Structure formats: structure tokens, C-alpha cells
Image (tube, grey):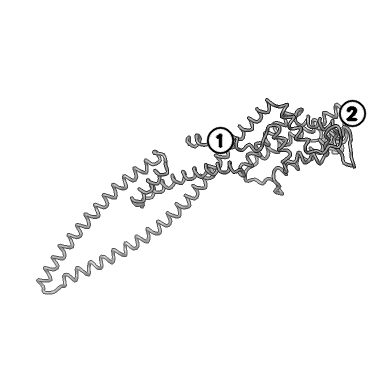
Amino acid sequence: MFAAFGGNKGDIGSVTKTAGNDAEKQKACSAAVAQWWLELQHQLEAESNRKEDAPINGNSKPFLLETTDALQPLLDIAFFRYWDMDHARENGERYITVEQSHRLLNDLLRTNEGAAITAIKDYMKYKMCSGGKDHEGVSAKKKELVDSRVKAAMDKFDLAAAVGNKDISVEDLEAAVTKAKEAKMKEEEIKGAEDALAEAKAANEKKTKFAKDNADKETERKTKEDAKAKEKDEKDGNDEATKKITAARTNDEAVKKTKEDKAAADKAEADKTAAEETATERTKTEEEATKAAEAFFDEQYTAAVDETVAEMEKAFSKTKFCNRQKASSKFFESTASKAEDGPTITQNELNKIMHLGECEKFDALCTELGFDANSFDAALGKLKLEDEAAKE
């Protein structure tokens, strides 16, 4: 890695061996800054490609702190390169002189603008995407979408479950259809249930009429049977025929009740099993709908962030000079100059400015360049959710 800065790759001591003239040494300075930007790009790309359920790292450090640690050797080399131009010290502390401090900032933001802007864009995307879950507006919008889509999925599931339940009553099926209409489900989604309800009503009317006809016939049969038994009892002078009929009917009722009780128990068990299976399937459907809705929102929000960051870059391209001037002022606000004629930078000051784990100073620098990591409202304004939902 150190070959980019001069010396032999793998020989850490070669980093201290500088080129023979200032021009070559200045090139090594600029190359060191470029390498920091490029490695930041690499770290952000690796994080972007990391699977959601994969561990970030072995010791569970936050990503930006881990990235700061990974970039620290490159920042140390960059500082050394600029310090090596003049070898300035005060009370034993090394610092970069005024001239080299301006060169450092120039190399950071202008000479290596391509690498810098690419890295900053990726950094903005990471910050806005990872920070969205903690932003009130973004999290509220996501919850609104997820709740809406999950409710629609569950309304659809409940209606399908009602239609698929062969033992459901007409009243319950009718209630399910009414609920679907109140939920403003699509007509094509409700039509099948309405057809099933119409068939169920017709079948229920037919069943009710059949039961009534049978009951009427049974009443007529018993009436004739009772009259015949009474006639026989009068003839025989006793009530044996009536007692016989009554006993037979009592036995028939007992047998019938036993069968009905067993059928009811069997049905209750079957209903319990069916209800458990439906509940399991419903939970699965809800989880899948939630996951799909969250993934859809994340995809659309990421696209909105990409668009927002692209607009930042476009705006920057029109006001580069002014933005770099503002960024320079912000950069040197974090330094305490050791010279009267301009700003100087110590290694500790540079470390704090470029610290991504405690990113206030770095974010402020980016903001002055025109890249604001808190542009959540701008991204929300570019979200495309309703039209996409209508297509599905």
C-alpha cells in the first residue's frame, strides 16, 4: 500500500524516505490525500455490499468508528508527508506550517476533487440511509406505508380465509364481504367473495326449505302414528301401543343425540385445528407483508437519497469556488494556529476533523461544500410511493 507514497511496498521504514526535491515530495503529499479518499470509498462500498444479517466486525464497533480506525494509518502518512516538507515543531509537537496547511486543504478538496466528491457522495448516502431510521419524518413515513400495506394484505387474507372456509355461516361470510368493502378493497378482489356469498345464500335457502319440508313430513308421520296407536289402545282397552311408540321415540332421540354430540365434538376439534392453521398462516402472511413493505420503502427511500445527493453534486459543480472557500474557513475553525501569518495544523487537529466516528467537524466541512447529511426532508420530498403501490 505504501508504494503509492514512495518507497518499497511492505517496508514501513521507507515511508520516511522522501523524494529528493520539493516537487516530488508535494506529489507524494497529494497522493497520500487521494489514497485516504479512495480508501473511504472502498470502506463505504464494502459496507453497502454487506448482507443485512452479517456481522459488521468482530468487536462490534460502529461502522464509522471502524472506518476511522481503518483510515487512520493513511491519515498518519498524509500528515507526515506535509509535515516532512518543513519539519515544524513546537514544544515537541509536530505541526504542518501555514503554506503546507493551505496545500493540504487544496489537495484535499481541489487537486483530488474527483476522489473527494465521489467519497463524499457515498458518505452522504450512507449517513442519510443509515440515519433515516432515527429521523422522525422518515420513520413516520415508513410506518405509514408499512401499516397501510400490511393492513391491505391482511384484509385480503381474511377475505380469502372466509371464502375458503366451507363451514362458515352466511352471516359471517356476509360480514367478511362488508368488511372488505369498508376497507376499500379492489372490486376484482371482492367479486369472487360476493359470488361465493350469493351461492352460499342460495344454498342456505335450499337447505332451510329442505329441513322445513322434512320437519313437516316428520310431524305429519308422527301425527298419523299417534292416531293409529290411540285407536289400537282404545280397541285393546290399554295404552300399550302409545307406550311402545313413546319408548321407541325416546330411544331414537337418545341415539340421535349421541351422534350429534360426537359430530359436534369432531367438528369442534376440526375447527380448532383449522383455526390454528389459519392463525399460523395469517402470522406468516403478516410477517411477509411487513418485510416486503419495509424492503419496498427502503428501496424507494434509497432511490430518493441517490437523487438528492445527485442534486447536491449538480449544485456544487455550479458553485465550486465559493463552496471550497466556505469549506476552507470551516476547516481552519478547528485549528489553533501556531503562526501569526496563517493557519497551521497539528496531527491531533487533523485527526479530529477527519474523525468519522465523531463526525461533527467532518460533516460541517461537507455541509459547507454543499453536501448536507441531514437533508432528510429533501429526500422525503422525492419519495415515490403511491404510484408504485398502485401498480402492484
Which label is found at residue 24? Answer: none
**212 and 249: which is toward the camera:** 212
Looking at the image, how many numbered discs can be counted on the residues?
2
260 lies left or right of 221: right
The answer to which of marks 1 and 2 sits earlier in the sequence is 2
Q: Which residue extends farthest bottom?
A: 238
Residue type at mark 1 is: Leu
Q: Which residue extends farthest front?
A: 340
Residue 132: name its quadrant: top right
Query: Is residue 14 visible from the viewing direction of this image?
Result: no
Q: What residue is disc 1 on?
A: 383
Q: Dot 2: what SS?
A: loop
Residue at the (66%, 28%) spot, across then down: 315
207 lies left or right of 226: right
Q: Crowdedness of circle 1 by 10 Å Cα count: few (<14), some, many (20+)?
A: some
Q: What residue is disc 2 on?
A: 20
Q: Quadrant of the N terminus?
A: top right
263 lies left or right of 73: left
Expressed as whole percent of the image width and height from the top left, the position of residue 214 reads 22, 56
Residue at the (18%, 62%) spot, across then down: 222
Residue depth check, mark 1 versus mark 2: number of the one nearer the observer: 1
Mark 1 to mark 2 CA distance (whole Å): 55 Å
Q: Dot 1: what SS?
A: loop
Residue type at mark 2 is: Gly
Query: Is residue 132 visible from the viewing direction of this image?
Result: yes
Expressed as whole percent of the image width and height from the top left, the position of residue 174 reads 35, 48
Q: Which residue extends farthest top?
A: 318
20 lies left or right of 1: right
Residue at the (51%, 45%) spot, across then down: 147
